[in-house]
Image: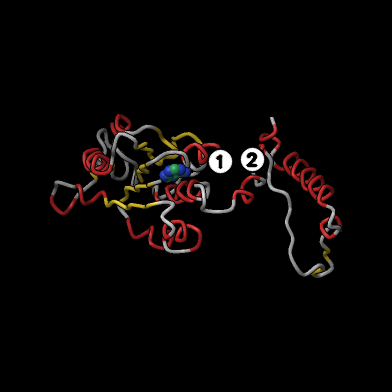
Amino acid sequence: MKISILTLFPSMFDGFLSESIIKRAIEKKLVKFEIIDIRDFSKLNNNQVDDTPYGGGAGMVMMVEPVVDAINSVKTETSKVYLMTPAGIPFKESIAQDLSKEKHIILVCGHYEGIDERILNYVDGEVSIGDYVLTGGELPAMVISDAVTRLIDGVIKKESYEEESFNDNLLDYPTYTKPYEYDGHKVPDVLLSGHHKNIAEWRKSEQIKKTQERRPDLMK
Ligand code: ADE
């Protein structure tokens, strides 16, 4: 799978791509990242990519042309293009699962007061990572890339995500490691019992309890 990210701030992705699971997935050629600098597609002096909003108002708006040219420079028949915007559909695990089956996704990062609305004619969807406004789409693009990459076959062990949060619409069960007792707090005895069926039942009931307490909306 290939993930192309279109941004005005390419170096923001340096750390993200060079550590841990994402780094290993790239090395194993399970995913290919391509970071495209939208500024390279400016046709104006000083590589200008933004201008003042028609009708007035605060801030600068990214111009549509360099963004569309950047999209077209990487787009093929199999590409899906998504715009990062707080006005998009809320990102969740099921969307990550769908995206992880695509051949090529293109994530477009807005900045300043967003991108000229006519960009919507050139994208397949708009995605938000939550009800808050960030300074740009770069962190959302990293969030989505991370959630999608870990679901690609071979990136992490299947067991790691088959039982985790949001599968079956349940939060994850609690996990513990050594020491057995810390500051008076002990590990639940069932986990030391060696009884796999009891452990599985306990984990499932903890998942249900936690989800009912914290995120009853998931269980509808
Ligand atoms: N750009 C700014 N805020 C955002 C958000 N919450 N989700 C996606 N893109 C954004």
Q: Which residue is mark 2?
A: 167
Find ligand 1 in the image and state its quadrant. Answer: top left
Q: Is residue 183 above or below residue 215?
A: below
Using the rendered view, name the quadrant where residue 105 is placed. Answer: top left
Q: Which mark is residue 93?
A: 1
Residue at 81% x, 45% y is 201
Residue at 31% x, 45% y is 59
Q: Considering depth in this image, is 82 or 133 the residue closer to the camera?
A: 82
Q: Amino acid at mark 1?
A: Glu
- Name the spot of residue 54 as percent of width and height, x first: 24, 34
Residue at 38% x, 62% y is 14
- Using a 10 Å C-alpha cutoff, classify the residue at mark 2 as few (fewer than 14 neighbours), some (14 to 19) or many (20 or more): few
Query: Mark 2 and mark 1: span between their CA atoms?
Result: 8 Å
Residue at 46% x, 39% y is 101
Q: Are marks 2 and 1 in contact (CB under 8 Å)?
A: yes
Q: Amino acid at mark 2?
A: Asn
Q: Relative to 71, is 125 on the left or the right? A: right
- Name the spot of residue 157 as percent of width and height, x first: 59, 53
- Quadrant where the C terminus is found in the figure: top right
- Name the spot of residue 217 as percent of width and height, x first: 67, 34
Q: Earlier in the sequence, mark 2 or mark 1?
A: 1
Q: Considering depth in this image, is 27 or 121 the residue closer to the camera?
A: 27
- Name the spot of residue 172 as percent of width and height, x first: 69, 47
